[in-house]
Image: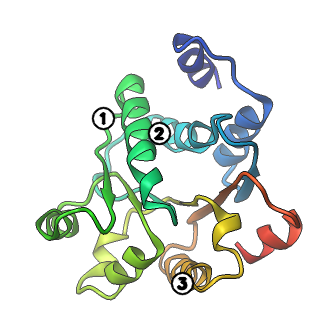
């Protein structure tokens, strides 16, 4: 917790209670659904825990450790930049990349051969990876999957894609932590249960 608080202070910020709670629950191996207003630091509430946990483990494993799913391609650039910046400042030395429709085919192919530590992607892209040859190797070190904008996906066709992907990934990686993020969600209990 101290390293997270000092990182926030280095930016002139104070940690909100929900950020502290996410860090604690994540480190305890729990799953969850974070619901907070836009612009409050939800990305850092979940990115810092997985970066810090990897640092505590000694940061020896290479390959995909965190998968961040967003239905909004426009957000992927900001999320990618924020997580990469946090990684660099914490000394985690993670490679954070995007895999969306505007990323070149050659870059996507390279990602399958040499996976980044964190991949920001869309529901459709996860299914394309799961349909590719050797996908098990790609996901073999996956620790966490974060579903951003869960309120946008819940009950939709794209949400069903996410649920199917989560089921497959959880079957491959039983200890996989699953977290959702939302700014506006009505029935928290049901949304968490579906996730």
Label 2, residues with CA under 10 Å away: few <14, some 14-19, many ≥20: many
The total of numbered circles placed on residues is 3
Q: Is residue 164 left or right of residue 62?
A: right
Alpha-carbon span between mark 2 and mark 3: 27 Å
The location of residue 64, given as percent across then percent down, is 35, 59
Alpha-carbon span between mark 1 and mark 3: 31 Å
| Residue 142 sits above or below residue 164 on the image | above
| Residue 110 sits above or below residue 61 on the image | below
Q: Nearer the viewer, residue 15 or 77?
A: 77
Q: Quadrant of residue 138?
A: bottom left
Determine which residue is flagged by label 1.
93
**Circle 3 — which element?**
helix
Among numbered discs 1 and 3, the one appearing first in the sequence: 1
The location of residue 88, given as percent across then percent down, is 34, 28
Q: Is residue 85 left or right of residue 3?
A: left
Q: Answer yes or no: is residue 58 visible.
A: no
**Circle 1 — which element?**
loop
| Residue 128 sits above or below residue 112 on the image | below
Residue at left offset 44%, top offset 68%: 122
Q: Quadrant of residue 9?
A: top right
Determine which residue is flagged by label 3.
161
**Circle 2 — which element?**
helix
Residue at left offset 88%, top offset 67%: 187
Q: Nearer the viewer, residue 93 or 53?
A: 93
For discs 2 and 3, the disc positioned in front in the rendered view: 3
Placement of the C terminus among the 4 image quadrants? bottom right
Determine which residue is flagged by label 2.
51
Residue at left offset 42%, top offset 25%: 90
Which labelled disc corresponds to residue 170? none
């Amino acid at each position: 917790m101290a390293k997270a608080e000092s990182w926030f202070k280095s930016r002139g910020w104070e940690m909100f209670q929900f950020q502290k709670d996410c860090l604690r629950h994540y480190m305890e191996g729990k799953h969850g659904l974070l619901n907070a207003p836009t612009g409050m630091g939800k990305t850092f509430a979940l990115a810092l825990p997985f970066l810090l946990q990897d640092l505590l483990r000694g940061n020896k494993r290479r390959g995909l450790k965190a998968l961040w799913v967003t239905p909004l391609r426009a957000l992927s650039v900001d999320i990618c930049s924020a997580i990469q910046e946090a990684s660099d400042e914490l000394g985690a030395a993670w490679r954070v990349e995007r895999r969306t429709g505007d990323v070149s085919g050659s870059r996507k192919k390279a990602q399958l051969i040499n996976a980044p530590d964190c991949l920001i992607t869309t529901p459709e892209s996860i299914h394309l990876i799961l349909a590719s040859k050797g996908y098990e190797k790609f996901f073999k070190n996956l620790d966490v999957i974060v579903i951003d904008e869960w309120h946008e996906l819940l009950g939709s066709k794209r949400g069903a894609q996410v649920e199917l992907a989560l089921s497959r990934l959880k079957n491959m990686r039983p200890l996989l932590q699953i977290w959702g993020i939302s700014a506006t969600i009505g029935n928290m209990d049901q949304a968490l249960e579906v996730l």
